[in-house]
Amino acid sequence: MLLCLMKVAGKDKASSKLLEVKETKVKGHETIKVFRVALPAALSGTSNDKIRVYTVYTHAQVPHPQEITQLEQQLVQIRTNLYHYSPYNTRKQSVKVLLSSSKIESYSKEPKPVSESGKEIKYGPYQDIPPFTAIPLSVHFENSSPFLTVTNLLRWIEVSHWGNIAFEETIDIAHTGSKLKGTFSRLDYQRGLTSKSAVADFKTHLPASAKDIYYRDEIGNISSSHVRKILNAVEVEIKPRFPLFGGWKTHYILGYNSPSADFLLKSGGNFVLQTRVVDHIYANQVIDKATVKIILPEGSTNIEIHAPFKVKRLPDEKHYTYLDFSGRPVVVLELENLVDEHTQPIQIKYAYDRMHLFFEPLLVITSFALLFAVVIVYVRFDFSIAKSKKE
């Protein structure tokens, strides 16, 4: 089973402030991923504090069985640790498992006490749990949620100081739930006799200032999509050319423009681009791999990246378009295992001399001036071989 830890956050329950979280190591348990949380104040022998630890995992629900027919519903299985995996002694612990369905095939009934009620399974309370204690927990239940996964995402962000920022995403998306067994019946699908886990459409949220939106694939524009304004966002209904069943995948391109005033800030002699590293593609999204390429104006220097989470910066590239002389610097970021909580803004700080704005207009003006000068000189010369006859 592939179980990936995507996001860890700590919050002080009294003030609701996010706490600083850093990855660390524990001697004797170097292979285990451990995080250090900075408390708002030091604890004495008699004091206590309450913190809320929030973690997100992906690929934790495994389809079981791996294949189903078009008419069957999807069952999944979770296998994880029952106890809170901690380097400290735990005096008291209770576990509550909230499921998406009350149709439960089986679940772990040890250690007791254990109780089940509808979509909820309760374990504990348990007393005096030693550090790094692991007890397997398994739950097998029906989950008809669409198991969409973005297997690969290439995101382009092109910055222009003439008032526009262009965004374009090339997305490979797959249904990673139970694979479709047997043939697909369009008639049964139209009559609604199909698995609830099949995906007919999903909704992508873009910035509120998004305009000139396009949605296409290799064949061309996909006209079945719909766009509407919602609170603080633009919602795009993405409807593939065919419904997605388990094991099926699709590929498409989504792009739009936005005013640079919404993303570009002036900071002293530098500029700061503040934008999300990825957009909200669909609810409860999972992105296995993402490559983000940010094209800055020609002449940009001293480029710095500031992100609220770990990103891998690859060597910068060059991008050439019309009238470029030395090429535009391209910041390349590589990220893996992204979820909804990663739709946070990152900052790209760079130095840029505004005199570069006039380079391309001056180049065009100079080119036309030279062309007109050549034409004027040309029409004033006589290049004929024979002499003209005198009257």
Image (cartoon, grey):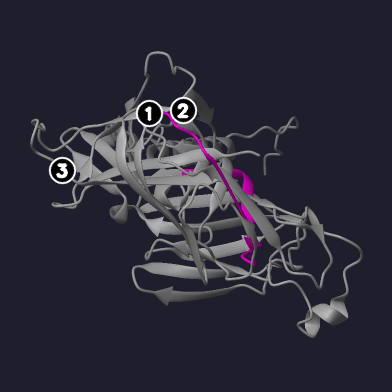
Q: Which residue is mark 1?
A: 131
Q: Which residue is mark 2?
A: 312
What predominant SS class does the magenta segment belong to? strand
The image quarter containing residue 390 is top right
- Of residues 322 and 97, the one nearer the viewer is 97
Residues drawn in magenta: 131-157
Q: Is residue 287 above or below residue 44?
A: below
Badge 2 vs badge 3, beta-carbon distance below 8 Å: no
Q: Residue furthest bottom?
A: 191
76 or 121, nearer to the observer: 121
Could you say where residue 2 lies in the image, as x and y percent from the top left?
63, 38
Helix, strand or loop at label 3? It is loop
Look at 45% across and 46% down and name the residue there. Answer: 56
Can you tell which mark lies on residue 49?
Answer: 3
Mark 2 neighbour density, 10 Å: few (under 14) some (14–19) many (20 or more): few
Select label 2 or label 3 by which is in front: 3
- Give me the residue at 77% from left, 68% from top: 242
- At label 2, the amino acid type is Lys
Taking the image as drawn, is residue 326 in sight?
Answer: no
Q: Residue at x 72, y 56 (%)?
A: 250
Q: Position of residue 36 (x, y in %)?
A: 29, 29
